[in-house]
Image: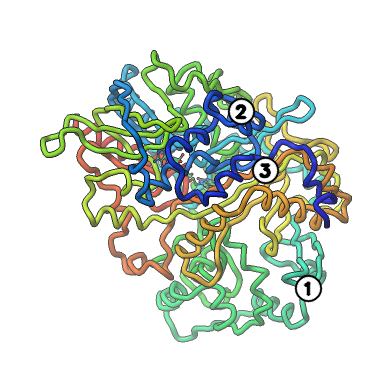
Amino acid sequence: MTDRDLGMHRRITRRDFLNGVAMAVGGAVILPHRAASLQGNDADDSPAAVRTTARPNYPPALTGLRGSHAGSFEAFHALRDGTFWDTAGPIVSTRERYDLAVVGGGISGLAAAYYYRKAVGKKARIIILDNHDDFGGHAKRNEFTADGRTYLGFGGTQSIDSPAPYSPVAKALIAELGIDVSRAAQVLDPNLYQELGLQRAFFFDKETFGVDQLVVGYSHQLPDAFLNAAPLSEAVKHDVRRLLTDQWDPMPGLSSADKKARLARMSYAHFLTHVWHLDPGVLPLFQTRTHGLFGVGIDAVPAQDAWGLGFPGFQGMHLDPGAGPGQNYDAIRHPEAVDYFFHFPDGNASIARLLVRRLIPGAIPGSTMEDVVTAKANYARLDMQESPVRIRLNSTVVRVRHDRPGASPMGVEVVYVRNGRLHRVWARAAVLACWHSVIPYLCPDLPEHQRAALAYAVKVPLVYTNVLIRRWTAFQRLGARAIVSPGFWHTSARLDAPVSLGSYRSSRSPDEPIVLHLSKSPCKPGLEARAQHRAGRVELLFTPFETIERHIREQLARLLGSGGFDPAGDILAITVNRWPHGYAYQYNSLSDPFWLEGGEPPCVVARQRIGRIAIANADSAAYAYTDAAIDQAHRAVHEILALR
Ligand SMILES: Cc1cc2nc3c(=O)[nH]c(=O)nc-3n(C[C@H](O)[C@H](O)[C@H](O)COP(=O)(O)OP(=O)(O)OC[C@H]3O[C@@H](n4cnc5c(N)ncnc54)[C@H](O)[C@@H]3O)c2cc1C
């Protein structure tokens, strides 16, 4: 299709000119004065392109390339490359003194501020510094408007949902914020899509499968009707059926523990092609099924975890229930974890917003879990002199070190770059709730073994894209609500979950606009997991928004064209949430021997307090979920409180 057919020329709210600038320099070196012009919404410093695309002071409504947006990472990349201080200029002291400085305004950083304030009292002076133009870290809100109505999407962290039960600490915070997870079923309409006859579907693309074809009725069980309709060879279908039904034990004579030990050391792809000896044409049916949890495909996911996740091929092996050594996903999920689920229309951004509401009264009006959904945050109130708690956005921290080097420190100096200028604040203590991999560049005082342990945490890159479309009649005609599409840039596309809460109403009729949610895990099959994550991150850095937009338009045209979808006319807005540093890395039995052998994992060494500096973030638990971010904030703050 031509650019014109796809609607690349259409005026929608999406193009972030800044991306072009960032890509032109590869994000490697942007000097502080240059970074100033990229830092975002401060009208005086912004180039014309920002003023035309940005709605100053209301980041959730910004479209285009979001997540790690232009202006949020360049200063840090220069620090990493060793060039930052060459051109840094003088550090200006703000003369601000705090009880606690928090680096990172994600859920961990916000929770750290909450716990500290709760323990020390409302007068505790706290500053939270974050490099993005919005708070929440991965827990970001995307807002769209069409015909005067607001549509919400999650830009990252999707739901309160964790493979293991939330700890009592994390549950207590959720309850203190006023979130009642037992209401999950009341706010989600389970019947809307069902009544319209919409099912999950799989798109076979011609590049991978030889023909473009949408087959509805897909599920992980690969039902007969689906397989019959699928454009797969008879040999592949035969092998898939064998895999699903044969009660074969490929490892007879071994104990369950020995079988698990073998499965932990081979990928699921290897299990299919070298243990089951299946036709390699089976692989694309499964390849991206693990993306959402691992950020890589089945070539880098241990077969033992695939068993835990319910993948086929293990039914004849008589494996004992319960996780084996080195297994992340247990075959039997704890019922408490299953029940502890809640989805806000903007995902866990609502948790971040509820935390901010507690920390800075007046920043987000209202008082309940219902009214927070539609409440407009007042960004001007986040960083006010008179407020004991301040959240300073667009502020990349570049150094955190103790004062009085050599003597017993009284506090911590925190240096950050904002609007191209370096500033210093002083605090009695600091919590680093930022990504582990950045900490070695910030803290000169770290011992070598801790630096290495911090650097081990390679974040998992992810892209969550929200596309506002004019109507979803094409989905209705095709009978699909969610489409797996392993051959495309985004490997899944689905209609927003019909959640209505407070005065927020989800889209109810196919004639109304709706938010489509697309996701991608950038990776490079064939490499070990962490190498795949690094390769995915590079891909994201060098993929400009226009390329992604074209991928989106072409993909939607091919998935939905036969249902009447017109990419040129039906797409109203696009927000690509790019997370090169996404999930916390969870250890993998294929590439992390200590994980199998029960040795001390690097995250334990990495999170040790250094004097008056404690370390939080989900990386501290090597566990990619909100409960980890909360638990680690709680631990870090209590390490600081113990010093008082
Ligand atoms: C796309 C996506 C979907 C997810 N979905 C779920 C889900 O459904 N459920 C779930 O439980 N978890 C989910 N997660 C995991 C999510 O990471 C955690 O739940 C949690 O939000 C992590 O919070 P955090 O504060 O530890 O880290 P982050 O959210 O990463 O926050 C850290 C903050 O520190 C900032 N920072 C880094 N360096 C600096 C610096 N030098 N100076 C200033 N600031 C800095 C970062 O930019 C960031 O804003 C998802 C993650 C992603 C990326």
Determine which residue is flagged by label 2: 373
- Residue 221's x, y, as percent? 68, 65
Can the viewer see residue 159 in this picture? no
Instruction: Identify the mark nearer the N-term, 3 or 2.
Output: 2
For this rendering, which residue is in front, 166 or 4?
4
Residue at 34 percent of width and 37 percent of height: 634
Dot 1: few (<14), some (14–19), or many (≥20) neighbours within 10 Å?
Answer: few
- Say what secondary structure mark 1 lies in: loop
Q: Which is more foreground, mark 3 or mark 2?
A: 3
Q: Is residue 482 above or below residue 255?
A: above
What's the distance in space between the residues labelled 1 and 3, CA to CA?
A: 29 Å
For this rendering, which residue is in front, 120 or 436?
436
Determine which residue is flagged by label 3: 466
Instruction: Identify the mark nearer the N-term, 2 or 1.
Output: 1
Quadrant of the rendered structure where residue 524 is?
Answer: bottom right
Q: Is residue 444 above or below residue 209?
A: above
Residue at 28 percent of width and 40 percent of height: 614
Which label was assigned to residue 210? 1
